[in-house]
Image (spheres, rainbow, N blue to C red):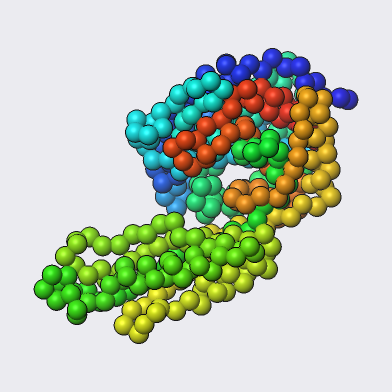
Amino acid sequence: MEAKLDLPFDNEAMLAGLRTWVECESPTHDAAAVNRMMALAARHLALMGATVETIPGRMGFGDCVRARLPHTSNEPGILVMAHLDTVHPVGTLANGLPFRREGDKAYGPGIQDMKGGTYLAIEAIRQLAIAGIATSKPVTVLLTPDEEVGSPSTRDLIEAEAARHSVVLVPEPARPDGGVVTGRYAIARFNLRTTGKPSHAGARLGEGRSAIREMCKQVIAIEEMTTEACTFSVGVIHAGQWVNCVATYCDAEALSMAKRQEDLDAAVEIMLNRKATGNDVSLEVTRGVTRPVWEPDAKVMALHAKAEAIAKRLGFALPHQSSGGGSDGNFTGAMGIPTLDGLGIIGAQAHTLEEHVIVSSMAPRAKLFAGLLQSV
């Protein structure tokens, strides 16, 4: 049966609802803030008739929310997988990125990555329920709190839940051309610590060995290893408490991304074997969270073909691509479960103070999502 696409999605109504989510700030490292956002989404799902449960967080991160929608079948169903944490600290709304509307653009922390896509996916489920249109399979929504730092506390839950489903839909942001994601590059994170020798920076500077200086050398060397096959970057550094003390320790976090797993594996080996630049300082590198490469297979391409056919009926093209910037789709795609990612809103400038979405893309993308829920 052909999917019904003439559902009454309204861009303005959806934006008004999304605003309440955007204005509930939820940075990853603030578990209480993330849990406030989880509670808001859980109530939204409960009002739709979903059976909602909260799964307690661990490792200092927030909780997860899992919602199961009523269905007559018990077959393996559709997992809608999304995260509600953002990279924007509490206070970003007041200082730098308030929710605002400028023409067809709406701005706010996390509005593109990925509260907008999550909201439209849930709205798609709601509109189907109101219209009395059944989804093709049972639907579960899994909302997680730590995707922006690699999902260290939730990967096991994501993989266990995905294994009970036949299809995974991920409403991460659409590609700039409006396309979707059918594969993701591999990503590895690393924790670095340099150790020096303390001294009084004013009275006995020459007796010290600065951990900060050594880390600066390492950062330059690491980032200069970037090639077309594999990138290296350092995004976090912490060191020092007093300017008049030569720093004993300096900690940093690095990230490497590659299109092929073998290139990432080589990068991991290089990073774990890095040495300090001198004998009077030391360097320790440990491996952090890793996202496996997700390469599209025939099942993924068949899933994209269904989405493309729905998009054509709605009047727009739906190209696909493999993409950097990992998501939890890396995990499910690498498991061999048909996964379609990038189903969220069209926008730009994620992770910046110019993060925004295109308001007019909301209803068409929600119709696409609703069509997939009826078809896959």
Query: Above or below — where is 250 with respect to 170?
Result: below
Q: Residue extending furthest right?
A: 1
- Percent across and percent down for residue 286 are 47, 69
**Visible residue check, residue 41:** yes
**Visible residue check, residue 136:** no
Query: Above or below — where is 149 with respect to 34?
Result: below
- Percent across and percent down for residue 355 are 50, 35
Q: From the image, which quarter does the C terminus lie in?
A: top right
Query: In front here: 49 or 360?
Result: 360
Q: Is residue 234 left or right of residue 239?
A: right
Q: Is residue 36 left or right of residue 66?
A: left
Residue at (22% x, 77% y) in the render: 208
Residue at (39% x, 71% y) in the render: 217
- Percent across and percent down for residue 24 are 43, 30
Q: Residue extending furthest left?
A: 203
Residue at (34% x, 33% y) in the render: 95
Residue at (50% x, 22% y) in the render: 102
Query: In front here: 168 or 309?
Result: 309
Q: Quadrant of residue 92?
A: top left
Q: From the image, which quarter does the N terminus lie in?
A: top right
- Percent across and percent down for residue 262 are 68, 68
